[in-house]
Image (cartoon, rainbow, N blue to C red):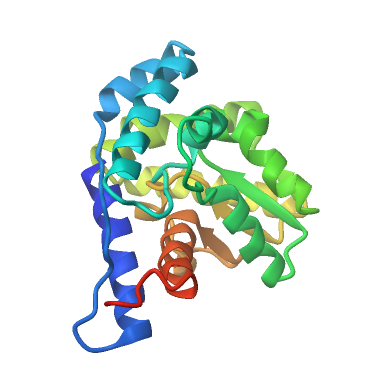
């Protein structure tokens, strides 16, 4: 989880520096929650409790002066409606900005890899489908493979060649079903799969989300006094 936070922090700072030059960096408020508690809520299907945990964090960030909010995980966007009710600042939805990127690249059918919640439930896929994008997910047995690699390996910082090969096989099967690109719909999958590894266009949601946030801050004039 610390790696995920550091990736967001790194990408946003690099984007601001590229845009403004010199010694500029991003102004970021970071609230890191205990992922063990969140994962337990997921496993127990207690989304309301996890939503309350993240809502409290969001309220604290709003009080601290945040202009908008990022949730640095795909799966927990399931509770965005619950969080948004408790804050006045907007939430930049990871699936919506990913859909924008897909449309820029003329992708109409995409493979989605992520946790089993992200792949099988509607909260994420519907954002893509509402943008006119057809979403393909792995077969049932491969959903479990993708999910177990995320939680049992990648979330612990473990990257195995056998797991990479399993993902390659699954991506190939989705390509054969018509996928024109693949969404790395879990912020840890980028540890395992990169563009150089596959011949389909890869859409890393961590990078898309973080870059979008940095550019939005500039476009909105939030960085006028950088």
Q: Is residue 110 left or right of residue 68?
A: right
Q: Residue 38 appears in which quarter of the rendering? A: top left
Residue 137 in sight: no
Q: Nearer the viewer, residue 98 or 196?
A: 98
Residue 118 in the image: x percent, y percent? 56, 34
Viewer-proximal residue among 162 and 16: 16
Quarter holding the C terminus? bottom left
Furthest toward the right, the residue is: 132
- Residue 159, image x and y in percent? 29, 46
Is residue 195 left or right of 159 when viewed as pictured? right
Q: Looking at the picture, does residue 215 appear above or below residue 33?
A: below
Whole-percent x and y of residue 124? 62, 39
Residues 215 and 142: in front is 215
Number of marks:
0
Task: Name the residue: 59% across, 27% down.
Answer: 141
Task: Using the rendered image of the protein, determine whether residue 209 is visible from the camera's viewpoint.
Answer: yes
Q: Residue placed farthest to the bottom in the image?
A: 22
**The N terminus lies in quadrant:** top left
> Where is residue 53 drawn, in percent x and y?
35, 24
Q: Residue at x 30, y 42 (%)?
A: 63
What residue is shown at x 35% (from left), y 43% (from top)? 62
């Amino acid at each position: 989880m610390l790696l995920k936070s550091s990736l967001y922090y790194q990408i946003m700072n690099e984007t601001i520096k590229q845009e403004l030059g010199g010694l500029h960096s991003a102004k970021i408020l970071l609230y890191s929650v205990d992922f063990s508690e969140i994962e337990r809520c997921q496993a127990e299907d207690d989304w309301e409790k996890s939503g309350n945990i993240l809502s409290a964090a969001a309220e604290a960030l709003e009080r601290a002066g945040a202009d908008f909010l990022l949730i640095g995980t795909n799966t927990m966007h399931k509770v965005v409606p619950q969080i948004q009710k408790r804050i006045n600042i907007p939430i930049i939805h990871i699936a919506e900005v990913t859909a924008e990127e897909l449309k820029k690249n003329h992708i109409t059918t995409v493979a989605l890899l992520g946790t089993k919640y992200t792949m099988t439930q509607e909260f994420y896929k519907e954002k893509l489908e509402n943008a006119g994008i057809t979403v393909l997910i792995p077969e049932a047995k491969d959903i479990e493979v993708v999910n177990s690699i995320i939680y049992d390996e990648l979330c612990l910082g473990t990257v195995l060649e056998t797991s990479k090969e399993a993902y390659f096989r699954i991506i190939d099967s989705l390509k054969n079903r018509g996928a024109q690109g693949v969404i790395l719909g879990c912020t840890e999958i980028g540890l395992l799969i990169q563009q150089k590894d596959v011949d389909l266009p890869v859409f890393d949601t961590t990078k898309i989300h973080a870059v979008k946030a940095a550019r939005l801050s500039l476009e909105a004039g939030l960085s006028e006094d950088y």
